[in-house]
Image (cartoon, helix red, strand yellow):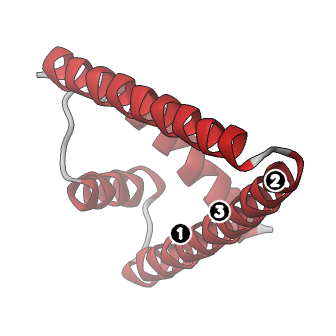
Amino acid sequence: MKKLILSMAFLGLGVFGFAQTTAKADHSQKKAEHLQKMKQELNLTDAQVAQLTALHDKKAAERKEAMATKKDGRMQKMRENDAEMQKILTPEQYKKFQDIKAQKMADRKAKFQSRKANATSVSK
């Protein structure tokens, strides 16, 4: 129960700390600063800090694995959908479908890059 409360407190503090940040800083630096702040506010021992660090690393690895699993599932569904489309469409229609899909993807990528460029120029 104590670990759960500490984890929730850490997450709550993290959300508020992140909301206050305007400039982009190195992720590991933010993580270290946040951990130091928690250590001071909660009067944590070095052993507790080590346990929290291990817990957060473990959770990050689990999230990364879950994201990879989700991505694999999405990719499989896309391949299945593509195979179904190929069965339904004629070869000419399928080629045109692929061209349209590629163009939409390129448009989305350009739009994303534009937003990313605007976001970095605003935050500096």
Q: CA distance from mark 2 to mark 1?
A: 31 Å
If you read the primary sequence from the N terminus, does the residue marked by circle 2 or circle 1 appear first? 1
Q: On the rendered structure, is 17 left or right of 101?
A: left
Disc 3 marks which amino acid? Answer: Lys
Q: How many marks?
A: 3
* 63 relative to 112, above or below: below
Marks 2 and 1 in Cβ contact (< 8 Å): no
Q: Secondary structure at mark 3?
A: helix
Q: Which residue is mark 3?
A: 71
Quadrant where the C terminus is found in the figure: top left
Local crowd size for mark 1, using a 10 Å CA cut-off: few (<14), some (14–19), many (≥20) = few
- The picture places residue 57, in percent across and down from the top left corner, at 48, 76
Disc 1 marks which amino acid? Answer: Ala
Q: Which residue is mark 2?
A: 81
Q: On the rendered structure, is 24 left or right of 100?
A: left
What residue is shown at x 21% (from left), y 25% (from top)? Answer: 117
What residue is shown at x 19% (from left), y 29% (from top)? Answer: 23
Disc 2 marks which amino acid? Answer: Asn
- The picture places residue 34, in percent across and down from the top left corner, at 34, 52
Local crowd size for mark 3, using a 10 Å CA cut-off: few (<14), some (14–19), many (≥20) = few
